Image (tube, rainbow, N blue to C red):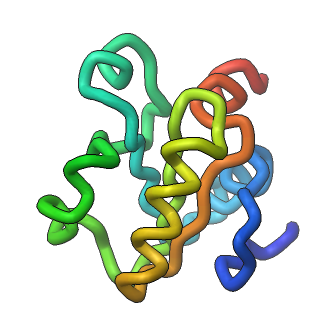
Amino acid sequence: MKEIDSSSNECIQVEVVKQALQQNEKIQIIDVRSKEEFVNNHIPEAINITLAEIENQIHQIKKDCKIITACGKGGGRSMDGAKLLKERGYNANWLCGGTNEWLNLK
């Protein structure tokens, strides 16, 4: 398995994250979309902290985990969220293809 490398500023492939979760790696998935988007569909393991709320809700984010941010398609809001978290000292990357890719991958 490819190790999740959070030192790069690249997104992480859905398959890599799913495999890491199956191997019980400590990962926290944060869906940075709006509450409405989250309720409509989301990654089962994800918690919802909107991009605008990350600063105020940072106490909910685990420092001892690999953080994967997700949005709808991956690379917009999730990239911004991962960048902000990295600046705060978190081990963070964003999910390639976002929630849509995750839910469509069988």
Q: Nearest the camera: 88 or 31?
A: 88
Q: Looking at the picture, does residue 35 appear above or below residue 76?
A: above
Residue drawn where x is 48% and y is 66% of the image: 67
Q: Looking at the picture, does residue 45 appear above or below residue 6?
A: above
Q: Describe residue 16's horizontal placement relative to residue 18 as left or right.
A: right
Q: Quadrant of residue 22?
A: bottom right
- The residue most toward the top is 40
How far from the left and from the top, in percent, is residue 65? 44, 75
Residue drawn where x is 33% and y is 48% of the image: 51
Q: Nearest the camera: 28 or 72?
A: 72
Q: Describe residue 1's horizontal placement relative to residue 75 as left or right.
A: right
Location of the N terminus (image quadrant): bottom right
How far from the left and from the top, in percent, is residue 53? 20, 50
Location of the C terminus (image quadrant): top right
How far from the left and from the top, in percent, is residue 14? 73, 45
Q: Looking at the picture, does residue 99 appear above or below residue 18?
A: above
